[in-house]
Amino acid sequence: MKTAAVIGAGFGGLALAIRLQSAGIATTLVEARDKAGGRAYAWEKDGFTFDAGPTVITDPDCLAELWRLSGREIGEDVELLPVSPFYRLMWPDGTSFDYSNDDAALTRQIAMLNPEDVAGYRRFLDYAGEVYEQGYRKLGTTAFLDFRTMVKAAPQLVKSQAWRSVYSIVSSFVKDEHLRQALSFHTLLIGGNPMSASAIYALIHKLERESGIWFPRGGTHALVRGMVAHFERLGGTVRLGDPVVAIDTLGDRVTGLACRSGWSAPFDAVASNADAVHSYRDLIGHSTRGQRAARALQDKRFSPSMFLVHFGIRGTFPGIPHHSILFGPRYQGLLADIFDHGVLPRDFALYLHHPTVTDPALAPEGCSTFHALAPVPHLGKLPIEWDEIGPILADRILDHLEARLIPGLRERLVTRFHYTPRDFAGDYNAHLGSAFSLEPVLTQSAFFRVHNRDDRIPNLYFVGAATHPGAGIPGVVGSAKATATLMLDDLRRS
């Protein structure tokens, strides 16, 4: 029987391991931390359950497919609950917009902002539908291993004006600034700047409209636990709490891997869901290929990091939806500070996660679980002392939420903690503390991202946010499908 190892039990690594094991490859999943999930880690504190993220689940069918490969159903291990509205968008001027796939409600809200934008939104939805079909349905699970594959996609890229930014393409359809922000902010959820991310990422809007937004009962980590249970049911092996320290090679072939505990094993193929720079520089840096690939990657543009405040409070808040976006007084200027200038500004925009409005069991009775997320520059642009700045920024965010949305928040606090770019770097070996790996701009898309199979070492593979199509659950699960196709073909031929 052929054997494979997958390094890193994030969503991409889990999805790849399930695909390999389902196809009869004896697969070992090796995770450095004490539990699976990668960035979808979870903490339990004072009776509250806190998801590290991601918390927005779209295209549940790409997950359900992982069970169907072996004739099972996702419902055996995971219960997905619909979330509505998808997001409540709020601005400092008092404007509020509930975004969902309720077409009539959307039309009414758009007409209240600007009646002329109703027709413009229809045209934008048609545009988003076209790039969704081409960029996600047709190419989302394609491995761009050579430039010829990119050339074949070029006509559609030209047709969709992929060189333009998401914000630019949205602005060509609608005029109201609130609506422009409402239709362009989604790229921030995958580490992209709406002002520079390729217009093809407008497909996210159609993806959400098409499949809805979902949340697992028990939190995002309940989905992780369900994937682990399914993988082990298939016969897969999971090693937790044992970081890989080296991918072993002989000539131009991978021969196995070694872990910090001293455990090592030979494998016919190895795939890494770990940070791409870490994989090349630290795990295979003993080889010329590893050193060169790491240097090339370090010259690329990386997505920003995130600062999160997790807090549990007394009281329930049925009027605060599951997902909220609190825009600040600036949009373009704030994005420029984060992505370009490396500034930690006084103002901020926040994503607020309130899972207990969907699943009250994530907090003690009569209490609520929240986290607030602010995009911040990565460590390469803002190398500050987060141990000092973190508590100050966390207090500012809580004060802002108390003044704007949750009166009496401070006196209701039961527990709180925060998570900084330095934590991303330490816990995930994330290069520069980036929360999403490579920034999703056109010159770092498809062929220009990390390839699913290494160009020089034919049995070394990659999966996850650094590969095509990028970050986000559908992105990394699509990446796993592309990588699994390559691995299975190669293993069957060898």
Image: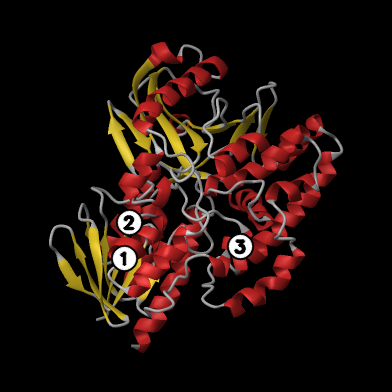
Q: In the image, what residue type sits under mark 2?
A: Ala
Residue lying at the far bottom in this picture: please name it: 493
| Mark 3 vs mark 2, CA separation in Å | 28 Å
Residue lying at the far right in this picture: please name it: 116
SS at circle 1 = strand
| Mark 2 vs mark 1, CA separation in Å | 8 Å
SS at circle 3 = helix
Closer to the camera in the image, 107 or 90: 90
Q: Which residue is mark 2?
A: 9
Q: Are marks 1 and 3 in contact (CB under 8 Å)?
A: no
Does residue 411 appear to the left or right of 153 in the view shown? left
The local crowd at label 2, few if under 14, some if 14 to 19, many if 20 or more residues have their Cα within 10 Å, is: many
Above or below residue 274? Residue 143 is below
Q: Position of residue 491 (x, y in %)?
A: 35, 82
Q: In the image, what residue type sits under mark 3?
A: Thr
The label on residue 6 is: 1
Among the 4 quarters of the image, the one containing residue 31: bottom left
Q: Are marks 2 and 1 in contact (CB under 8 Å)?
A: yes
The label on residue 443 is: 3
Q: In the image, what residue type sits under mark 1?
A: Val
Does residue 301 appear to the left or right of 290 in the view shown? right
Closer to the camera in the image, 9 or 244: 244
SS at circle 2 = loop
- Picture residue at 25% right of the left edge, 53% below the top: 32
